[in-house]
Amino acid sequence: MKRYSQLTRLIWDYYRESQSESQQLRILGNCKVNRRWGNFRIDCPNEEIAHTVSDLIPLLELPIIKLRLAKRIKIFVEGDLFQVAAVGCQNLSPADARKFLSNY
């Protein structure tokens, strides 16, 4: 049985009520997830998975903001930087921002 990181399980638990979003985020099980110095780091085994994860950044942002986990999301492929996204900037939709601010 594969053990997933605590951060991966935390993100999955955040969306446990929403089946479709939870299913989309299952791809994180293929990646190594950790955080350090304000970065939420996702190490992907290949570019295909990295592209899928980068499309999920808006889903990842909300729990990262609410739980104050990081300021940036960095996606790596085999140790090479693939993408950097600032948390809470352009990818957060107005509806998600309202949801975040109403619960803050």
Image (tube, rainbow, N blue to C red):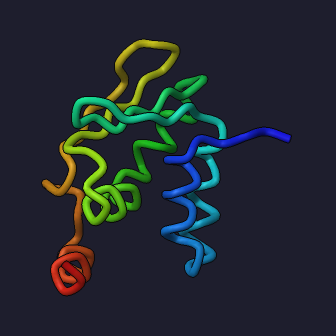
Against 16, residue 37 (above or below) is above
Against 64, residue 99 (above or below) is below
From the image, which quarter does the C terminus lie in?
Answer: bottom left
Question: Within the image, what quadrant is residue 34 found in?
Answer: top left
Residue 50 picture location, percent across and down: 49, 33
- For the point 37% across and 35% down, the residue is 35
Against 5, residue 60 (above or below) is below
| For residue 57, side relative to residue 92 (left or right) | right
Residue closest to the eye, 71 or 83: 71
Question: Within the image, what quadrant is residue 32 found in?
Answer: top right
- For the point 37% across and 24% down, the residue is 82
Query: Of all residues shown, which one is farthest toward the top?
Result: 79
Question: Within the image, what quadrant is residue 94 found in?
Answer: bottom left
- For the point 36% across and 62% down, the residue is 63
Query: Of all residues shown, which one is farthest toward the right?
Result: 1
| For residue 57, side relative to residue 20 (left or right) | left
Against 22, residue 8 (above or below) is above
Residue 26 picture location, percent across and down: 64, 53
Residue 19 picture location, percent across and down: 63, 76
| For residue 45, side relative to residue 14 (left or right) | right
From the image, which quarter does the N terminus lie in?
Answer: top right
Residue 75 picture location, percent across and down: 39, 31
- For the point 45% across and 13% down, the residue is 79
